[in-house]
Image: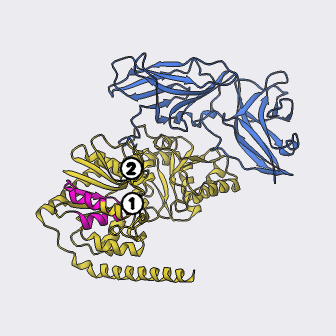
Chain colours: A yellow, B blue
Amino acid sequence: MKISFLIHNAYGIGGTITTTFNLAAALAERHDVEIASVLRHREHPNLTPHPDVRLRPLVDLRREKDDPRHREPAKVFPAAEYRYHQYSELTDQRIAEYLESVEADVVVGTRPGLNVHLALQAPEHVARVGQEHLTLDNHPPRLRTALRRAYRHLDVLTTVTEADADSYRRKMRLPGVRVEALPNSVPDPVLPAADGTAKVIVAAGRLVPVKRYDLIIKAFARVAAAHPDWQLRIYGKGEEQPVLRRLIESLGLWNNVFLMGAATPMEAEWVKGSIGVAASNFEPFGMTIVEAMRCGLPVVSTDCPYGPGEIIKDGVDGRLVPVDDADALGEALLDLVRDDELRHRMGRAALDNARRYAPGPVVAQAERLAKEAVAARSTGRRPAPDGGRTLSGQGHAAADLALAAASEALRTLRKGRR
Amino acid sequence: MSTTAQDTDTPRAHCTVDADGRTTFRIALRSAGHPRLALVPRAKKNAPQQPTRLLDLEPHGDDGDLRAVLEPLPALAEGRWDAYLMRETDAVRERLRPGLRDLRALVDGNLRERPSPVAVRVPYATKDGFLAVRAWLRPAHAEAGRLDLADGAMTVHARLHGAEPSDGATALLRLRGDRDTTRSFPLRTDGSGFSFTAPFAELTGAAPGDQVWDVFLRPAADVPPVRIGRLLDDTADRKTVCVYPALTVGEAAARPYYTVDNDLAVEVTAVR
């Protein structure tokens, strides 16, 4: 197969970029793979693609950022998309040209706005796979309405969790579109797994409010009080850093809690710990949870929507606790700190259970989905619409239209007041 | 992890450090020649230039990787050593990028007794993204542990390595830039280590403007003081990781911190 990925900016840093590069590299072993990057702002990408994967920038900002067409708003890329401000008449044009002339059998979109381009502009013979790395329920109503119109022209829509796939099936009427959860994969670790003896708890991610590092620090205070030889290491940087620093100081935890700064890759840092911890209020997937488990760490996490509950088996390879409950989080951490045998057993289970996120199984699923999409396109045979869910899909569509209209009205009112 | 997507084309070295400091470097490189890894010390003011340490890169196992081993002895002189690859004997040196640094054996290094001289090495990534080794080499070393801050004073718990404290041992804070201005505090025995309490009020007003006090242990009256710092784990740069709050003492704020060399100091600044 010839496979082309369409990505926002392959030259930046982020989960979608890493996942796409990893998937493209694995597929390149057996297929002809390219990555089309809508934007390019530097000579080399932060991650070098597999030597057999071609990288194809569509708009080079270093030369073209002052192009008059780049100052005109985009018309195809949906206005309610998070990155709308980075798109323009120029990106509309280049993406359309790319799709018109694409030689691939299947094009894979990697974010909502690009999936819209793909759904509306790909030639009839090209199979269309849209990937969602965020979640339907967290999209603004106006974006949901735009996606509802466009996504019915996709062949396959992948989400990163079953829960999100279920939302799409229930809340959008997408007849003939195969909706399936395709988790992010985490490459096989290079280093030996953690042996569970280090008195170190590790957390990692961007330091932003939704990740609730404050809750982790408060929960860890219980651990430090009973076991002062244990430490908590938090890797990452972000706007919450000074807030977290003040919290550490006010709780007197400077001997036990450390803001380590960013570390990439994290593998060598995970293996220094023996427990992983996450406390997000919301997590579309939970890449760091999988990374920690693949390094042999049991992970204590909040059971927030959507990822953690699908990754962790509570009591077997980690613990799931209620969102925003420092006591429950602290108690679950203490259980693992106090009981060496339990910690070791769960660590081994985490190592085994997280293998389902290895590139092998995930790539095989991606390959199957792409083949099915190509087959469906070439025979012109698309599965029959699912009549039973139409009504509920229409209900959600009406609700989103109403919500979108309401927020539009609110915006107009606010403008009027200024 | 993240091995499928490699960061750049420059050569990259993974390394593993044993508890005793033995460091194994691994580079994915095919070479028919005589490749070597060079550790080049950064020049230091008022110190003789150390010779470059050259290590043979040899095939190991059948994964095609080349390995070089830096044995615990001879110890590296204190300072920062940049890592380079020399593909051939007379080849140009190419700076190495850091790969995975497996330093897990160092994490609880403060629990082990160290003989004199105390030698420590921690591979790290420089700010501009290259591989280097941070080395410390001291006749004796006092490793700081828990640091309590209360009632306008700091209590430092520490352990002496490479020397024995006598009955007359004291903690010494010395004003930076003025070796003659010092403050002494009595030591208490504290398990396998010692502790002392330094009231910050004794540090204010010693000199005009902001001051820095470096923290030492004097094992006996007639021996040179030993620096108190925190060197015995996997952290090469502690300054931004181990951060303590400031205490307000009269018109000043006093805050303990780790220097760029991971030594303990106290900064005293006027509150405006």
Using the image as rendered, state which of residue B180 and residue B76 is in the foreground: B180
From the image, which quarter does the C terminus of chain A lie in? Answer: bottom right
- Residue A384 in the figure: left or right of residue A342: left
The Cα atoms of the two marked residues, 2 and 1, are separated by 21 Å
Question: Tag 2, which secondary structure?
Answer: helix
- Residue A7 in the figure: left or right of residue B52: left
The image shows residue B223 at horizontal and vertical percentages of 81, 21
Question: Tag 1, which secondary structure?
Answer: helix
Using the image as rendered, state which of residue A164 and residue A293 is in the foreground: A164
* Quarter assignment of residue A167: bottom left
The image shows residue A111 at horizontal and vertical percentages of 35, 61
* Quarter assignment of residue A200: top right
Task: Tell me the chain of label 2.
Answer: A
Task: Tell me the chain of label 1.
Answer: A
The image shows residue A374 at horizontal and vertical percentages of 17, 58
Q: In the rendered structure, which disc, 2 or 1, sits on the residue that comes first in sequence?
A: 2
- Residue B143 in the figure: left or right of residue B28: right
